[in-house]
Image: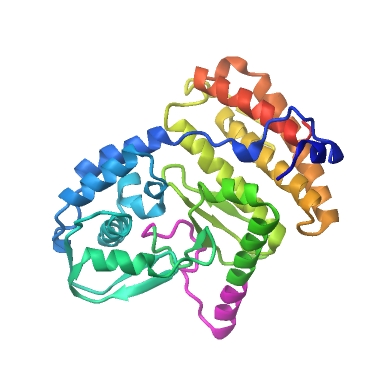
C-alpha cells in the first residue's frame, strides 16, 4: 500500500484521489438482473423448475452478492439470438446452484454439454442430473488466480470476439503449445500483480471475473469488453505489462458500465464527436469519457509499476508519460463541454478529475 510518505517520493500530491479505492456502485445493474430472472424461460428440453433458482438469484442480487455479476448470467444480460441458447440456460442454472441455492432441482440433458467452471470446464453427459451435484463440481477445485481464463468461451456461452480460440481451436501442435505459453504468461502476470500491487489487483478482480484470450495477430494489441455483459473481457496475452494494462483498461470500462446502469452519464442528445486519445476516428463524448476513465487507471498502473518494480522500468516510464499526455488531452475535451453531462455524469467526472491527480494530472 502506498503511504503518504511514499507519495512524496514518487511526486504524487497527498490529497490526490486513490484510484484503487474508488469503485462505482453496481446496485442498479444488480437490481436489473434480479428483475430479469422472473421472466427467464429456459429451453424446454432442460426440464428446469426455475422457482428456487429464480428466488435465490433475485434475493442474492438484492443483497448485492458479487457472484451475480458474472458472464455466466449472459442469458439474462444479453438478448439473442445466439447459436446455443440451451448452453447459456444450462450455465446459468448450474452457476446459481454453485452459489448457494438450497434446492436447485434437476436438469435433463438430451446431448452432451460442456460446463464451465473456474478451474476450466468438463463435459456433462446426457441424462438427468442433480443441480446440487453440478454446482459442487463447479466449486470443487478453486481457480489458481482471481480472474479465470476461459479460452473456450464457456462461461458466457458465445465467442465474444472473432479471434478467440473457441472460434478457431488450435489446428496444430505448435498452436496448442502457443496457447499454453500465453496462458502461463497470463497466470504469472496476474499472480505477480497480486503480490506486488495487491490494491490494484483487488480493484481489477472486483469487476473482471473472466478473461478470454485472443489468438495473436501480427502487429495488433487488442482488448475489449461488452457493455451489457458483466465480468468478461477479452485480450491479447503478449507480455506482463501489456496484460496488466489491458486488465486495468477493461476493468475501468466495466466499472464505468456499472455506473451507467443508474442512468446515462452523458446527455444522449449531445451528438457531437471529438478527437479521441485512443482511437483514430472521432468519437462521441461518451467515448472520450470512457477513454479518459481508462487512462486514469493506465497511468496509475504504470506509476505504481515503477514504484514497486513491476516490469521493465524504462518501458513503464515511457508508457506513463504517454498515458499522462493522452489523459490531459481527454481531460481538456471533457472540461470544454460541461453542459453535455447529466447530473450523475457531472459527479462522475468530478471524481475522475480527483483520481487523475494520482498520476500527476
What percent of the width, then of the height, locates residue 151? 48, 67
Residue 169 magenta-highlighted: yes
Q: Taking 264 as reference, is 357 left or right? A: right
Name which residue lies at 68% across and 19% down: 336
Name which residue lies at 83% across and 49% down: 317
**Span colored in magenta:** 156-181
Q: Main secondary structure of the magenta part?
A: loop
What percent of the width, then of the height, locates residue 299? 73, 42
Residue placed most toward the observer, 293 or 64? 64
Q: Taking 290 as reference, is 40 left or right? A: left
Name which residue lies at 70% across and 28% down: 331
Residue placed most toward the observer, 217 or 239? 239
Q: Taking 361 as reference, is 294 left or right? A: left
| Observer able to see residue 43 | yes
Q: Which color mode does the image show?
A: rainbow
Residue 104: quadrant of the picture:
bottom left
What percent of the width, then of the height, locates residue 55? 21, 45
Residue 299 magenta-highlighted: no
Residue placed most toward the observer, 261 or 22? 22
Residue 22: quadrant of the picture:
top right
Please identify the residue farthest to the bottom as the structure is shown.
173
Residue 347: quadrant of the picture:
top right
Q: Quadrant of the N terminus?
A: top right
- In the image, residue 324 sits, relative to residue 219, either above or below, namely above
Q: Quadrant of the C terminus?
A: top right
- In the image, residue 30 sits, relative to residue 53, either above or below, namely above
Amino acid at each position: 500500500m502506498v503511504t503518504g510518505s511514499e507519495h512524496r517520493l514518487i511526486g504524487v500530491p497527498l490529497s490526490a484521489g486513490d484510484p484503487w479505492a474508488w469503485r462505482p456502485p453496481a446496485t442498479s445493474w444488480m437490481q436489473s438482473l434480479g428483475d430479469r430472472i422472473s421472466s427467464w424461460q429456459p429451453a424446454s428440453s432442460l426440464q428446469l423448475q426455475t422457482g428456487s433458482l429464480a428466488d435465490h438469484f433475485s434475493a442474492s442480487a438484492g443483497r448485492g452478492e458479487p457472484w451475480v455479476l458474472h458472464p455466466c448470467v449472459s442469458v439474462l444480460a444479453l438478448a439473442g439470438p445466439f447459436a446455443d441458447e440451451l448452453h447459456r440456460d444450462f450455465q446459468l442454472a448450474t452457476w446459481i446452484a454453485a452459489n448457494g441455492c438450497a434446492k436447485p432441482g434437476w436438469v435433463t440433458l438430451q446431448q452432451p454439454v460442456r460446463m464451465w467452471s473456474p478451474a476450466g470446464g468438463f463435459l456433462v453427459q446426457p441424462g438427468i442430473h442433480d443441480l446440487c451435484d453440478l454446482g459442487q463440481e463447479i466449486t470443487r477445485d478453486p481457480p489458481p488466480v482471481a480472474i479465470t481464463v476461459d479460452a473456450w468461451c464457456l462461461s458466457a456461452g458465445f465467442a465474444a470476439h472473432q479471434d478467440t480460440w473457441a472460434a478457431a481451436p488450435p489446428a496444430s501442435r505448435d498452436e496448442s503449445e502457443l496457447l499454453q505459453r500465453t496462458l502461463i504468461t497470463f497466470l504469472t502476470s496476474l499472480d505477480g500483480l497480486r503480490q506486488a500491487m495487491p490494491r490494484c489487483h483487488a480493484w481489477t478482480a472486483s469487476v473482471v471475473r473472466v478473461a478470454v484470450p485472443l489468438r495473436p495477430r501480427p502487429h495488433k494489441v487488442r482488448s475489449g469488453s461488452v457493455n451489457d455483459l458483466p465480468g468478461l473481457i477479452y485480450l491479447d496475452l503478449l507480455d506482463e505489462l501489456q496484460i496488466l494494462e489491458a486488465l486495468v483498461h477493461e476493468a475501468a470500462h466495466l466499472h464505468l458500465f456499472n455506473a451507467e446502469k443508474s442512468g446515462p452519464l452523458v446527455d444522449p442528445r449531445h451528438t457531437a464527436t471529438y478527437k479521441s486519445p485512443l482511437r483514430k476516428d472521432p468519437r462521441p463524448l461518451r467515448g472520450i469519457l470512457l477513454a479518459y476513465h481508462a487512462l486514469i487507471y493506465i497511468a496509475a498502473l504504470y506509476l505504481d509499476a515503477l514504484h514497486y518494480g513491476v516490469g521493465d522500468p524504462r518501458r513503464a516510464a515511457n508508457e506513463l508519460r504517454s498515458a499522462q499526455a493522452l489523459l490531459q488531452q481527454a481531460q481538456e475535451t471533457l472540461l470544454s463541454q460541461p453542459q453535455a453531462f447529466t447530473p450523475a455524469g457531472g459527479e462522475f467526472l468530478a471524481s475522475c478529475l480527483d483520481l487523475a491527480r494520482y498520476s500527476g494530472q
